[in-house]
Image (tube, rainbow, N blue to C red):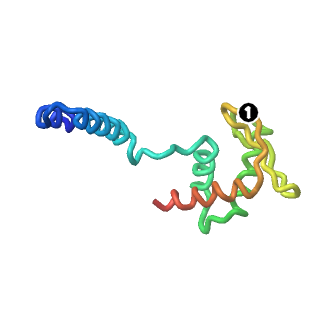
Amino acid sequence: MNLAGYLERTLPPSPEREEALALIRLGLSFQKHHKVGKRPGPLKAYLLKVTGRIESPVTFEKLLEELELEAVRRDMHGTTASPVEKVDRIWEIITYHHPRAGRQQLTFKTIRNHFTWCKLNLTQ
């Protein structure tokens, strides 16, 4: 028996009962999504995979080296080998191919933020 059905049977008919039932039904629909959270996007998932291959200590410099290797892999084996096209250390930009949005240029600051998230989720 659910909570809304229980209240329908126990409370006398009134406008307050209908309002309470509407609020409870709304709360129950939100409860289904409680603690589901936002799933990581393709970039975070990819960086988590790459970060998992790095030997400890895991640093941003090692991540950049690994991403440079991924860019070389893409040049050698084609676009299916890696979504990373280029790592530009001078301009501090990484060119990444998002599956839906296409080619994106991301700053090192953005990659560093994702890297922090990856390090937190790598240890869990």
In the rendered image, residue 15, in percent from the top left (x then y), is placed at 25, 33
Q: Residue furthest left?
A: 10
Image position of 49 with respect to 17: above or below: below
- Report x, y in % for residue 10: 11, 36
Query: Which structural element holds mark 1?
Result: strand
Taking the spot 58% from the left edge, 51% from the top edge, the residue there is: 48
Residue under the image location 62 percent in, 59 percent down: 54
Residue 7: where, in percent of width, then height?
A: 17, 37
Residue that mark 1 sits on:
102
60 in relation to 81, above or below = below
Q: Label 1 neighbourhood size at 10 Å, few (<14), some (14-19), many (20+)?
A: few
Residue 61 lies in quadrant: bottom right
State which quarter of the image contains the C terminus: bottom left
Q: Amino acid at mark 1?
A: Gly
56 left or right of 90 in image: left
Residue in the picture at 24% in, 37% down:
16
Could you tell me residue 84's position as x and y percent?
74, 43
Asked if residue 14 lies left or right of residue 29, the reply is left
